[in-house]
Image: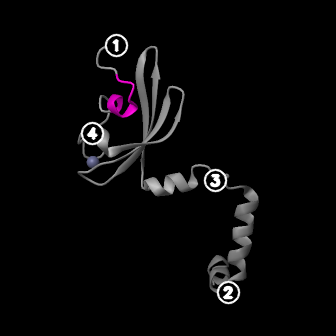
Amino acid sequence: MEEGYSQNPLENFKLVAFCPLCNAQYHPHQASVLEQKEDAHLVYVKCEQCGSAIIALVVTGLMGISSVGLVTDLTEKDIRKFQNASAVTSDDILDFHHGLRREKTVKAFLDGE
Ligand SMILES: [Zn+2]
């Protein structure tokens, strides 16, 4: 094992993680692993300095550690709630649209009245 490399994904994460909004350095205790599969970890980090959050995919490979992060307004609880939910389908959207059409105020708005 290479020097500076840890089996703990959160320890590795500190090597690469800065808040994209305020540039504060993340610390392992701020991060939680949402999901882990083989050498890939889905990590949630909330910045203590500015309160923003990211979801990052951290992958450990033969060439080292790489990560892709995404700024989110979801909380960790939201992510866990929707993580395994089924995708929204076009039928769901149509049902929602029909539901809105049944509401008088919304129907008037959609009809431009
Ligand atoms: Zn920040």
Is 109 within the magenta? no
* The residue stretch that appears in magenta: 6-13
- Where is 89 relative to 44, above or below? below
| Element assignment for label 1 | loop
- Where is 33 relative to 3, above or below? below
Q: Nearer the viewer, residue 72 or 79?
A: 79
Q: Given the image, on which type of amino acid does mark 1 rest?
A: Glu
What residue did someone put label 2 on?
104
What residue did someone put label 4 on?
27
For the C terminus, the image quarter is bottom right
Q: Given the image, on which type of amino acid does mark 2 rest?
A: Lys
What residue did someone put label 3 on?
85
Q: Earlier in the sequence, mark 2 or mark 4?
A: 4
Q: Given the image, on which type of amino acid does mark 4 rest?
A: His
What residue did someone put label 1 on?
2
Mark 1–mark 2 Cα distance, whole angstroms, equals 66 Å
